[in-house]
Image: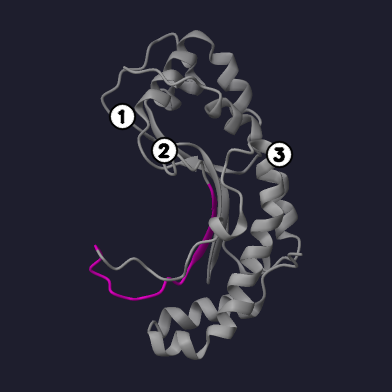
Amino acid sequence: MFKGFTDGTLDFLIAIRFNNNREFFHDNHDWYTESVRKPLLELAGELSEVVEEIDPELEHRPERCVSRINRDLRFSKDKSPYRDWMWIGFHHPANKHGFPGFYMDISPDHLGYGLGFWEDNKPLAQAHRLMLQNHPEVFSAAIGKVPGGMTVEIRGYKKLAVPESVPEKLRPWYPLRSFYVYRNINDARGILDPQIGEVIKAEFRKLKPLYRYFAGLKPVEE
């Protein structure tokens, strides 16, 4: 049962930031396991129940959803072996970054969570554009359910003209390439709130209509 993150969680992430070497990590592996990985697995287990309700096809097994602390150094100039932040990602197994998924991440001074996809998915984006032209009210209803105060970031095709028929408030969504809808918490009191798991679960449920909108689109080749 997830009871919240602790000072030990944030202290370890700060410590690994400034002692990013294998000797320190191995000497403090128990600290990492108890204060970082264990609560993340517990939180992933609770969030997975909500994600499974929304779409059982999303990967929701906690051990598959919690990130590894080891960094992939093969193509990076930064050879620091460990991350100082961790995440939980609930994604579609067949399209990890180009299909909407839910996520949560934590660092020493930040906790964020939300919904989005990160890579181009042209057939899905084309289906979305056709929906905005022909049935804008469908997307309007879905985006209208997003909880107040959440940040919306849209990455779009810069040279794509927006038809005049698309309602003004939906026009930024027309040239869609990828998007994030998220909330960030940037103070320790909020990050360490023992009820943060319940807060995230509630907001994942409120993001269900937006997820279902994109998941329900039938991809269209341009």
| Residue at (47% x, 66% y) in the render | 68
User: Mark 1 packing: few (<14 Cα in 10 Å), some, or many (20+)?
Assistant: few
Look at the image and give the residue range highlighted in magenta.
75-90
Q: In the figure, 2 relative to 140: above or below?
A: below
- Going from N to C along the chain, the mark reached first, 2 or 1, is 2
Q: Residue at x 64, y 57 (%)?
A: 44
Identify residue type, mark 3.
Glu
Q: Quadrant of residue 203?
A: top right
**Could you tell me the amino acid type at mark 1?**
Tyr
Question: Is 7 placed above or below 102 here?
Answer: below
Q: CA distance from mark 3 to mark 1?
A: 33 Å
Reading the image, the residue beneath label 3 is 53
Is the magenta region chiefly helix, strand or loop?
Answer: loop
Q: Nearer the viewer, mark 2 or mark 1?
A: 2
For label 1, the SS is: loop
The residue identified by callout 1 is 157
Nearer the N terminus, badge 3 or badge 1? 3
Numbered disc 3: secondary structure: helix
Residue bearing the label numbered 2 = 98
Between disc 3 and disc 1, the foreground one is 3
On the picture, is 63 further left or further right than 123?
A: right
